[in-house]
Amino acid sequence: MGEITRTVVLHVPSNIVYKAIKEHFIRKWIRTYCPDLIRGTFVQDIAVDYSLLKDIENSELVFTASKLGSRTEEKFTISPIEEGKCEVTFNLRYRLLFDSDARAFFIQVISCLLMFERGYKSK
């Protein structure tokens, strides 16, 4: 399996980051709020459903997914470092996924976390 790990510091409380990551990866929101947008589209066919393997509230989330023979495991470790700030370590393990696809996915997740922080700070 290939593996990539990075840590980012976010100016967002750890409990809010935990909830956002969990809701994003469980993805029930897509079927709840946007079923008409994905019905009959390519997105519906390739959408990956994540399974929650480990859930330690406000501290750690581990998801697994498989699609078309590829398997990934996404682990988020969330640690408060001071009031209103936390450190998020994202670890991606992947098998039979093109390395460039894994890196692009990884960059997209880090980007989402940073945009989440920007939106939180602008409130």
Image: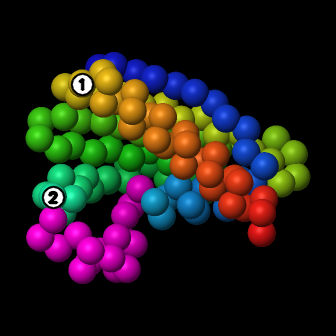
Residue appearing at x 45%, y 23% in the figure: 4
Residue furthest right in the image: 83
- Above or below for 116 versus 29: above
Q: Relative to 36, is 82 on the left or the right? A: right
Q: Amino acid at mark 2?
A: Phe
Give percent across and percent down for residue 9. 73, 38
How many labels, in total?
2
Q: Earlier in the sequence, mark 2 or mark 1?
A: 2
Give percent across and percent down for residue 82. 87, 45
Give percent across and percent down for residue 13. 76, 56
Residue appearing at x 24%, y 24% in the figure: 98
Q: Which residue is mark 1?
A: 98
As helix, strand or loop, the secondary structure at mark 1 comes to loop
Q: Amino acid at mark 1?
A: Phe
Q: Which residues are magenta?
A: 25-41
Q: Quadrant of the C terminus?
A: bottom right
Q: Looking at the magenta stretch, what is its main secondary structure?
A: helix
Question: Looking at the image, which is closer to me, 101 or 95?
Answer: 101
